[in-house]
Amino acid sequence: MRIVSGIQPTGNLHLGNYLGAIRNWVKMQDEVTAAGGQCLYFLADLHAISMPHDPAQLGANTREMVAALVACGIDPDRSILFNQTQVPAHAELQWLLNGTARMGWLNRMTQWKDKAGKNREGASVALFTYPVLQAADVLLYQATHVPVGDDQKQHLELARDIAQKFNNDFAPEGQPVFALPEPTIPPEAARIMSLRDGTAKMSKSDPSDMSRINLTDDADTIMAKVRKAKTDPEPLPSDKGGLNGRSEAANLVAIYAVMAGETVDAVLGRFGGQGFGAFKPALGELLVEGLAPINARFLALQNDREALDTILVKGAYKARELAAPTLTAAYQALGLVRF
Ligand code: TYM
């Protein structure tokens, strides 16, 4: 088994990233490395330049994200933790895959449509070809599983389509150049929603900090954000069906269930019939308790620049080695001369 996944170093890690993806990264690290497989986790810093960004901030954000991932439980001795920029094979393979990816496929990507908005002519080319780089990220390592939140599912389906077409076009009889990766999406936390709007996903790009819980928020901030989270006036229902059409309530109950390791029905069995005046403080406390150890580890690590850079140097070294054979096979399949 080979696990590969990435995260953009664009500011704080939030609860959506943690419950949707990073918790699974840690779980897979513990299971897969014990069974002799490998886990590669990277900071998608090349993806981060597809939108306007501040060069003075990118390095700091990258190191901050390394500290956050380690604080969440990623162990750089067991997982390979690195930044994309340090492994040039990602950008090289993207170019090779640009010959296989189709304009029509990329035009259908919902993230492209959302992020470019009405101003397609003014969007960067990198934003358009973003999913091809993402395909290169996973195909380069023959990833078997890719732990992500639901919003990345479409990009991974595209990676499979690109791999399949490349294999068909350039290795029709021999050994396929790329393995087809499977997305691993946690059913109960696939899509954590904004605290201000139950129809929008929790996101780093939401201008309101009240819309998300950051893993660096202190206890008072977490309690205040949960207290002010948007809800409706009805009490909580006693079973899951009663959450239909109540997106904000459903989101808060889902967060509680995942953090407590319980089912939604078990949570409603306890809180059904009660109002948010009772539920919100319980949810706030659960979050404070669950996130406090991560927060403490993050604060202890974040200013140790030398330690963080050493992690990235070592990770890149290992990743380059694992990337080399597939990159060579892709060049060869395309007939490119390379000594
Ligand atoms: P990014 O940086 O936006 O998010 C990192 C991970 O967090 C998940 N996630 C969520 N899950 C549930 N609810 C939410 N509200 C929520 N918000 C974010 C994302 O699904 C993701 O798993 N393009 C990717 C980074 C990337 C990548 C890759 C991922 C680059 N190359 C190769 C996998 C494989 C991104 O921008 O994720």
Image: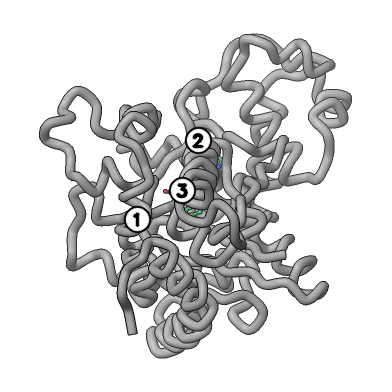
Residue type, mark 3 in image: Asp
Q: Is residue 254 left or right of residue 219?
A: right
Residue type, mark 2 in image: Gln
Q: Earlier in the sequence, mark 1 or mark 2?
A: 1
Q: Which mark is residue 105?
A: none
Residue 66 x, y percent position in the rendering:
47, 71
Residue sitting farthest toward the front:
173
Q: Which mark is residue 154?
A: 2
Residue situated in front as seen by the camera: 105 or 291: 105
The residue pinned by badge 3 equals: 169
Please say if 316 is above or below 144: below
Q: Pointer 3: residues within 10 angstroms few (<14), some, or many (20+)?
A: few
Element class at badge 2: helix
Q: Is residue 95 left or right of residue 13?
A: left
Residue situated in front as seen by the camera: 330 or 79: 330
**Which residue: 82% across, 72% down?**
35
Q: Quadrant of residue 90?
A: bottom left
Q: Is residue 43 left or right of residue 15?
A: left
Residue 271 x, y percent position in the rendering:
80, 25
Q: Pointer 1: residues within 10 angstroms few (<14), some, or many (20+)?
A: many
Report the Cα–Cα distance between label 1 and label 3. Answer: 36 Å
| Quadrant in which the N terminus is drawn | bottom right
The residue pinned by badge 1 equals: 10
Q: Which of marks 1 and 3 is nearer the N terminus?
A: 1
Ligand 1 under 8 Å from disc 1 Cβ? yes
